[in-house]
């Protein structure tokens, strides 16, 4: 807000976008910043919509897929603390209950938010990239959003 005010006062270019983490297990952006970006017409480029791969379900049950970030770097602890694993498992199960790919549901949720202009995806394989891109065709139905919000109430922002 200070930068935007200074830009306006001095007739300088305004901030066009910001890049913050935003995903099913880290919705802290909704607490204040979403209102600011909407009122000030600043776009959010949400990054980590898959929670560093956890929201794909590939780490469920302690799995360590070869070539995955966790296997290669073992530095993804924020998703393994507190209620993080419970929340992640709940979202993965919810996607499967609705017949959806967990990765696609996670991405589709992020891009469905009014304050998100785009999301930043990452893929290691062509198959992952195809899955991520196909999420653009998925619309979050009202009943799915209700289920997502129920989980969010049970496990609010466990991985900020």
Image (cartoon, helix red, strand yellow):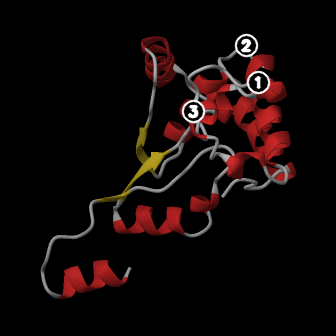
Please say if 31 is above or below 112: below
User: In the image, residue 111 lies at what x, y percent?
Assistant: 49, 38
* Camera-nearest residue between 26 and 67: 67
- For residue 116, the mark is none
Q: Earlier in the sequence, mark 3 or mark 1?
A: 1
**Quadrant in the rendering for residue 18:** bottom left
Dot in front, 2 or 3? 3
Closer-to-camera residue (9/107): 107
How many C-alpha atoms fall within 10 Å of the one at disc 2: few (<14), some, or many (≥20)?
few
* Secondary-structure class at tag 2: loop
Q: Secondary structure at mark 3?
A: helix
The residue tagged with tag 1: helix, strand or loop?
loop
- Residue indicated by mark 2: 99
Task: Say which residue appears at 82% left-offset and 51% top-offset.
Answer: 155
43 lies left or right of 100: left
Q: Which mark is residue 63?
A: 1
What residue is rendered at 76% in x and 33% in y? 91
Q: Measure how far apart labels 2 and 1 are at the Cα level.
A: 22 Å
Q: Earlier in the sequence, mark 2 or mark 1?
A: 1
> Which residue is depicted at the point 81% across and 18% down?
97
């Amino acid at each position: 807000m200070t930068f935007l005010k200074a830009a306006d006062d001095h007739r300088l270019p305004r901030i066009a976008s910001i890049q913050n983490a935003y995903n099913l297990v880290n919705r802290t952006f909704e607490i204040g910043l979403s209102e600011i970006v909407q009122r000030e017409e600043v776009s959010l480029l949400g990054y980590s919509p898959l929670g560093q791969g956890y929201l794909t379900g590939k780490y469920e049950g302690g799995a360590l897929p070869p070539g995955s970030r966790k296997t290669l770097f073992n530095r993804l602890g924020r998703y393994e603390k507190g209620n993080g694993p419970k929340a992640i498992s709940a979202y993965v199960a919810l996607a499967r209950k609705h017949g959806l790919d967990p990765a696609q549901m996670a991405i589709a949720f992020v891009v469905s938010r009014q304050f998100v202009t785009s999301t930043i995806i990452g893929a290691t394989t062509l198959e992952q990239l195809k899955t991520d891109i196909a999420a653009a065709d998925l619309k979050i139905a009202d009943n799915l959003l209700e289920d997502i919000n129920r989980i969010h109430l049970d496990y609010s922002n466990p991985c900020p």
